[in-house]
Image (cartoon, helix red, strand yellow):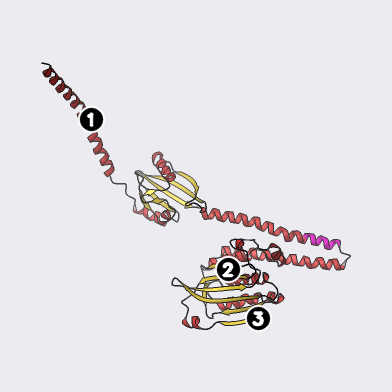
Amino acid sequence: MIDAVEVVLATVLGLAVGLAVIPMLNWIKKRSRATAADLSEPSPQVSEQLQVAVGLLRAGALVVGPYDEVLLSNPRARTLGLVRGSRVSPEELLDMVRGVRQSGQSVGSVLKGRREPGTPVTELAVRIAALGEGLVLMIVDDRSAQVRTDEIKRDFVGNVSHELKTPVGAIRVLAEAVEDAYDDPEAVHRFAIRLIAEAERLSELIRQIIELSRLQSDDPLLQPEVVSVDEVITDAINNRRELAESRSVNLSTAVTPGLRVLGDMRQLTSAVTNLIENAINYSNLGARVSVSSRACTDDGDDFVEIAVSDNGIGIPPEELDRIFERFYRVDYARSRAEGGTGLGLAIVKHAIGAHGGSVNVWSKPGQGSTFTLRLPAYEEIPAAATESPLTTRGTS
């Protein structure tokens, strides 16, 4: 009897559980089918007009779909690291995209950070707008270079102000000294000589500031001319021949004739002239300065190298990384005595860089220095030019 009751109770309990579970299973099935349908639903299509517009933008641009997938991006966006696979990167930008999609309101922001440890700080101006149907448009402008340029300009203005104060102050003091010594012809003559020297130093400083500013605004490769390296070296030596003779410095050349590059004759001559002037000023009386040129090939590309060597005082190793900074002087006292402005090597680096070239330096204290300019050759170097012996001459 008891067994029969237990069977009946078990049967009733099973029916009750079954009746309760079946609706739940049906709901789960329906929900699964709905989710699968949502996932299989194709993402909204990006119009051809939007594709063309994104491709034309210089800033990084990308279109993000309703499931945070990147549907479209231009090369600049990938260069900036805004896309990782098919997702938006970094996470901070993805959060902004989701917020815009949900609110429908456009947002703008500035993100600062570093792409890699030890690299310069980046600054990205971000604008995000909803396009409808879950699509979001993001445009990112990399302002890092502009920010660094602005910082350089501010530093440059500050340095210029400081550098100008010194000769201007000296001129004022010397003028007052001349006024006080009007009845002492010998003192007036002595002060007048120093006054002229300070005026010339100020004039040279202003000239090089103008030269550097002009170089920064000119692109020599926009309308380049074919430049003879022989003429560049000849003109540069002639520009500083008088200075060399005044210090009894022997100038010599060892050139490979017929080399040519593309660019601006005046800028290249100015760069070589500054190197020769530095070599003379930082050499002792009776020293030697050599200017040479040669053709070379690196990884299948043809280059022209112009080297200026001296056997002067040399540059300490810890100073080599800073010598191309504006207004930086290895030996401030000697530079001031020689009328140096600290802008010569900055002009050299900027001019050669604008020509697609590079500047390398070797130096050892007490043994001298060699500055080498490497520029892309205008054309394949003729065999006659590479096989002919060097033409060597000297002046003293």
Kindly identify the amino acid type of the residue bearing the numbered disc 3: Thr
Q: Give the foreground label among 1 and 2.
A: 2
| Residue 356 placement (x, y as % from top left) | 51, 67
Q: Visible in this render: residue 13?
A: yes
Q: Give the foreground label among 3 and 1.
A: 3
Checking the image for residue 24, the label placed there is 1
Please report the bounds of the magenta region as a residue range. 172-182
Front residue (pair 122, 161):
122
Q: What kind of element bears circle 3?
A: strand
Kindly identify the amino acid type of the residue bearing the numbered disc 1: Met
Find disc 3 in the rendering and name its residue: 395
Vertical side of 86 occupied by 3: above or below: above
Vertical side of 74 occupied by 341: above or below: below
Find disc 2 in the rendering and name its residue: 362
Q: What separation in Å lies between label 1 and label 2 (alpha carbons)?
A: 82 Å
| Residue 250 placement (x, y as % from top left) | 66, 78
Q: Give the foreground label among 3 and 2.
A: 2
Asked if labels 2 and 1 touch by Cβ distance under 8 angstroms, the answer is no
In screen coordinates, is 126 left or right of 202?
left
Q: Earlier in the sequence, mark 3 or mark 1?
A: 1
| Residue 333 placement (x, y as % from top left) | 71, 63
How packed mark 2 is, by other alpha carbons closer than 10 Å (few <14, some 14-19, many 20 or more), is: some
Asked if labels 2 and 3 touch by Cβ distance under 8 angstroms, the answer is no
Vertical side of 44 occupied by 295: above or below: below
Q: Visible in this render: residue 228?
A: no
In screen coordinates, is 169 left or right of 22?
right
Residue drawn at x 65%, y 55% as measured from the top left: 158
